[in-house]
Image: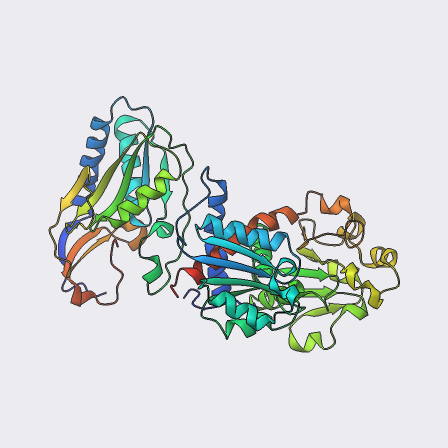
């Protein structure tokens, strides 16, 4: 029973019991955000270092708020203002941080496996907050927490994930976690944004057109088109992408009448999702953000409460 | 669990009498207090608080608000707990400011649970006073804490295991005291 790991590096190797333990605890942590005094002493005296080698506002702030609500001391380090710009290697940076004896290190890095490399090197618990296109486990878990507010996370539920699957660590982490719980996952992306052999490694349904993914979906998860990668010409134009793959009200009608709409942010309004849908009554996008804090509190609590 | 070696302290009928008496004492002591509330400590404290709430309503017609408190996040032994406790939901759907709070738990032992609970309560507001009601006081305090309402006093050594079972979570009402060795592996009541 429960969750007994030193690190949280991905959702791929999490068991259904571990996922449900984290979600159940996160459910209890939600209440703390509604208190007049939003702080509990559970991680008093623990140090959490947020080590972000890639830009992030939401995730970093979310981890910082989560740590502070648990009374941990949160320290932020971003690559732009660190010795990384002076040419220090990742391992040297991490060794230096380890020398300051943190209890938990939250890391985001552009290379796949960065968090794994560090976890094997330091005594502190490591949380992967995104490693390249590989995994972003806390985002997937907060997505599951949000789904669980509206739907039962069990076989029979259908989640459609539409967008740049190939470059999305959010999609990957969600696919692993959802399929572990027996949820049906349908993905849809332009062929240039679809990893080859996806159907062979995960039990998912790959659709050619978004309409096919949307039919019968209980949850629609739209992914961000990474405009910064557009120099590689993965589709002819943003306008074409919006026309063929974007989620608008008309397309959303193909999903179940009570389907919810999710987006991990930041959104490109008018590209992968219209403002009408993003701000509509079926959108739970801001709930995802609120739940992110509760979920990260649960993760920090499980990793940090065990003593180094 | 084997029940052969269990020494019974009180059964369902006696528990009913004890709770009725405690309810009576709570009402008598707090007459005129407008903001009186019950807060149970999970798990069995909540069951007992619910029963007190029902008895007080039947007797005096007064329905006291009931809160649920999980003290996990306030424990002082989190960093050396061997297995991680599962967090449950705290629900205090009323303001504690200026309220008189009756904190309810099943067993009073070291006093550490009560200390955690008071820390938790104070995070929700500034109660005018906090009173403590327990079904069993087994002694061996490690902190300067005393109960205002005590069901039964069972002087027990730290080697003994005092168990409270209530119908809502265990299927039947029973209080027992046993030497620890006969209950190896079962979780203790209170920390």
Looking at the image, residue A221 lies above or below residue A204: above
Q: Please state the horizontal and vertical placement of residue A213, each as a whole percent of the image.
A: 74, 62
Residue at 82% of width from left, 63% of height from top? A230
Q: Please state the horizontal and vertical placement of residue B71, each as a whole percent of the image.
A: 35, 49
Q: Quadrant of the C terminus of chain B?
A: bottom left
Quarter-of-image position of residue A1: bottom left
Q: Is residue A233 left or right of residue B154?
A: right
Q: Is residue B88 left or right of residue A254?
A: left
Q: Quadrant of the N terminus of chain B?
A: bottom left
Q: Please state the horizontal and vertical placement of residue A301, each as a whole percent of the image.
A: 44, 57
Question: Which residue reaches farthest top?
Answer: B32
Question: Toward the viewer: A287 or A156?
Answer: A287
Q: Please state the horizontal and vertical placement of residue B48, each as a whole percent of the image.
A: 28, 43
Q: What's the coloring here?
A: rainbow
Quarter-of-image position of residue A204: bottom right
Question: Toward the viewer: A287 or B119?
Answer: B119
Question: Toward the viewer: B52 or A7?
Answer: A7
Evaluate whether residue A119 shows in this view.
yes
Q: Is residue A114 left or right of residue B172?
A: right
Evaluate whether residue A151 shows in this view.
no
Residue at 14% of width from left, 45% of height from top? B152
Q: How many numbered circles are shown? A: 0
Question: Toward the viewer: A234 or B189?
Answer: A234
Q: Is residue A212 left or right of residue A16?
A: right
Looking at the image, residue A125 lies above or below residue B166: below
Question: Which residue reaches farthest front?
Answer: A86
Residue at 35% of width from left, 64% of height from top? B83
Looking at the image, residue A87 lies above or below residue B124: below
């Amino acid at each position: 029973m429960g969750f007994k790991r030193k690190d949280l590096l991905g959702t791929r190797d999490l068991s259904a019991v571990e996922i449900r333990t984290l979600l159940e605890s996160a459910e209890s942590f939600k209440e703390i955000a509604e208190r007049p005094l939003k702080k509990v002493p559970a991680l008093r005296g623990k140090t959490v270092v947020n080590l972000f080698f890639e830009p992030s506002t939401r995730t970093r702030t979310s981890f910082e708020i989560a740590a502070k609500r648990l009374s941990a001391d949160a320290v932020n380090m971003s690559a732009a203002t660190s010795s990384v710009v002076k040419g220090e290697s990742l391992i040297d940076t991490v060794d230096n941080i380890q020398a300051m004896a943190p209890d938990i290190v939250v890391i985001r890095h552009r290379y796949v496996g960065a968090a794994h490399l560090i976890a094997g090197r330091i005594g502190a618990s490591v949380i992967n907050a995104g490693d390249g296109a590989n995994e972003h486990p806390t985002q997937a878990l907060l997505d599951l927490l949000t789904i669980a507010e509206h739907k039962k996370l069990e076989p029979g539920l259908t989640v459609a994930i539409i967008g740049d699957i190939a470059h999305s660590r959010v999609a990957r982490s969600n696919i692993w976690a959802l399929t572990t719980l027996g949820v049906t996952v349908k993905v849809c992306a332009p062929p240039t944004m679809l990893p080859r052999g996806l159907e062979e490694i995960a039990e998912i349904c790959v659709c050619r057109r978004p309409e096919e993914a949307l039919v019968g979906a209980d949850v629609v998860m739209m992914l961000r088109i990474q405009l910064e990668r557009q120099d590689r010409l993965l589709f002819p134009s943003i306008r074409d992408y919006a026309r063929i793959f974007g989620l608008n009200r008309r397309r959303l009608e193909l999903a179940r009448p009570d389907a919810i709409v999710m987006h991990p942010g930041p959104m490109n309004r008018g590209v992968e999702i219209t403002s009408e849908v993003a701000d509509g009554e079926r959108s739970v996008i801001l709930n995802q953000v609120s739940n992110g804090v509760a979920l990260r509190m649960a993760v920090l609590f499980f990793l940090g409460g065990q003593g180094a | 669990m084997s029940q052969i070696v269990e020494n019974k302290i009180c059964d369902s009928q006696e528990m009913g009498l004890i709770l009725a008496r405690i309810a009576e004492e709570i009402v008598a002591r707090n007459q005129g207090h407008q903001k009186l509330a019950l807060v149970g400590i999970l798990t069995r404290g909540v069951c007992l608080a619910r029963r007190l709430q029902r008895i007080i309503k039947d007797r005096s017609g007064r329905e006291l608000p009931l809160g649920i408190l999980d003290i996990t996040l306030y424990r002082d032994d989190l960093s050396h707990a061997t297995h991680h406790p599962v967090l449950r939901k705290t629900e205090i759907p009323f303001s504690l400011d200026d309220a008189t709070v009756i904190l309810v738990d099943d067993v009073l032992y070291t006093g550490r649970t009560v200390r955690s609970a008071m820390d938790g309560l104070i995070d929700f507001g500034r109660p005018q006073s906090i009173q403590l009601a327990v079904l069993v006081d087994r002694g061996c305090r490690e902190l300067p804490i005393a109960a205002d309402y005590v069901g039964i006093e069972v002087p027990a050594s730290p080697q003994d295991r005092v168990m409270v079972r209530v119908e809502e979570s265990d299927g039947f009402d029973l209080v027992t005291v046993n030497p620890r060795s006969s209950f190896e592996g079962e979780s203790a009541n209170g920390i």
